[in-house]
Image (cartoon, rainbow, N blue to C red):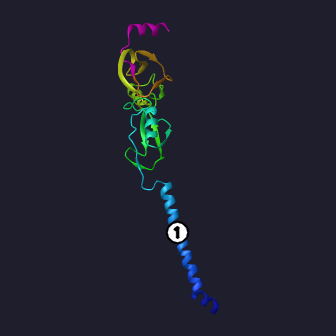
Amino acid sequence: MGNFFNFLKSRTFLIQIGLALVVLVITIFLVLGWLNSTTNHGEFVEVPDFSKQSVMEMRKSIEEAGLRYEVLDSANYNPDFPRFSIIEQNPVAGAKVKTNRKIYFTVNPSGYKKVTVPQIIQVTKRNASSMLKAVGLDVQRVTYVDELGKDMVYQIKYKGKYIKPGDKLPKTSKIELVCGNGNITDRAIIKADSE
């Protein structure tokens, strides 16, 4: 045991410890220098604003900035942006990122997705309006015809043409409801009598 403690106090051991520390310090400096050169430490690129750019314009800008990109699935159509233009980006414009960083883009689709017209025939105007709003359609106007059911929906029109439940229309389309006014005509009475 005494030999071991004598060895720890010896000059040979202290020289070896000193050499090991010198090698360790040199290794740390070399690794830090290599990391700085390969990770562009302290070198950042400001992310440009790609908002409303077409995909072709974005590709050119992103190459010039030394960045990479990935286009994500298109979101819901936004009428405030041109079709097939960038509506979102991550990281956001102005963020500082390293060269070759990947930027994720969401592109505006070509238009609103289509929705199915619900079954609103023989439904009250009020309920029909709620059902249409629930699927993303709007009532532009209501016209009335001589039918017994007051405020009952008898027909549906889109851009002046008759449509039926189950038809597909672009979301946010404005449609016309043709409802009864509660009046029954002589024609309707004759038709009922003949049946």
Please give the name of the residue rendered at 49% of the width and 62% of the height, measured from the top-left corner: 32
Depth check, front residue: 90 or 130: 90
Q: Residue at left 39%, top 37%?
A: 51
Tell me if residue 182 comes above or below residue 54 in the rendering.
Answer: above
For the N terminus, give its image quadrant. Answer: bottom right
Q: Position of residue 70 (x, y in %)?
A: 50, 40
Query: Residue 67 location in percent, x, y?
Result: 47, 43
Question: Where is residue 117 drawn, in percent x and y?
Answer: 47, 25
Location of residue 2 by image quarter: bottom right
Please give the name of the residue rendered at 54% of the width and 67% of the height, measured from the top-left corner: 27
Residue 10's place in the image compared with 27, above or below, is below
Name the residue at 35% across, 17% down.
143
Which residue was labeled with disc 1?
26
Q: Amino acid at mark 1?
A: Ile
| Residue 1 can be seen in this image | no
Snapshot quadrant of residue 180: top left
- Asked if residue 189 lies in the magenta stretch, the reply is yes
Q: Is residue 183 visible?
A: yes
Q: Which residues are magenta?
A: 175-195
Where disc 1 sits, the SS reads helix
Front-most of residues 67 and 138:
67
Residue that extends furthest to the bottom in the rendered view of this protein: 2
Structural crowding at the residue carrying mark 1, measured as other residues with C-alpha within 10 Å and reported as few (<14), some (14–19) or many (≥20): few
Q: Is residue 34 magenta?
A: no
Q: Position of residue 29 (x, y in %)?
A: 50, 66
Between 81 and 131, which is closer to the camera in this rendering? 81
